[in-house]
């Protein structure tokens, strides 16, 4: 079972209809996963620095446990996708609680 704050790798569906393996952060709580047969909600992590900072959150190696990024990375806070636990290829690490809370605040600000 995966948990909220885990960084996982999934085949992410892009707007052009293609899939590409990408790291993402689980933002849904563990209860949803247990109640809904492994349902997870994720936000994409990208190294595309052309994103508007209005809808993204910088993510650095010191903000996570167990993962190092090869490039400067950002969390795309305006895109949340639903996946099943079976869609996860592997667990890469975990976002530290303080930074996860800030990411959630940024998601709320970006969407609502």
Image: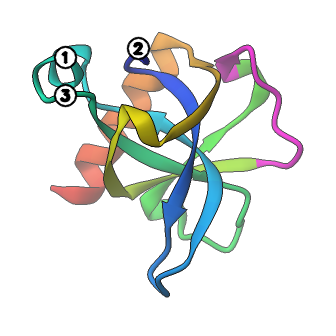
Q: Quick check: 90 above or below 96?
A: below
Q: Quadrant of the C terminus?
A: bottom left
Say the numbered circle drawn on residue 34: 1
Residues at marks 2 and 1 touching, judged by CB atoms closer than 8 Å: yes
Q: Which residue is mark 3?
A: 37
**Per the image, is 75 magenta?**
no
What range of the chain is rendered magenta? 63-72
For mark 2, what is the residue? 1
- Residue 79 lies in what quarter of the image? bottom left
Q: Earlier in the sequence, mark 2 or mark 3?
A: 2
Q: Badge 2, how many Cα within 10 Å: few under 14, some, many 20+?
A: few
Q: Compare residues 37 and 66 and report the one nearer the observer.
A: 37
C-alpha span from label 1 to label 3: 6 Å
Q: Secondary structure at mark 3?
A: loop
- Does the magenta-highlighted stretch encompass residue 64? yes
- Residue in view at x 57 percent, y 33 percent: 8
Q: Measure how far apart labels 2 and 3 are at the Cα level.
A: 11 Å
Q: CA distance from mark 2 to mark 1?
A: 9 Å
């Amino acid at each position: 079972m995966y948990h909220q704050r885990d960084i996982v790798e999934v085949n992410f569906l892009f707007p052009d209809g293609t899939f590409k393996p990408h790291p993402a952060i689980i933002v849904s709580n563990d209860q949803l996963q247990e109640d809904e047969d492994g349902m997870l909600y994720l936000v994409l992590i990208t190294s595309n620095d052309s994103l508007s900072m209005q809808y993204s959150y910088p993510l650095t190696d010191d903000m996570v446990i167990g993962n190092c990024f090869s490039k400067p990375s950002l969390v795309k806070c305006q895109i949340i996708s639903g996946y099943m636990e079976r869609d996860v290829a592997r667990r890469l690490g975990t976002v530290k609680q303080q930074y996860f809370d800030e990411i959630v605040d940024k998601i709320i600000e970006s969407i609502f």
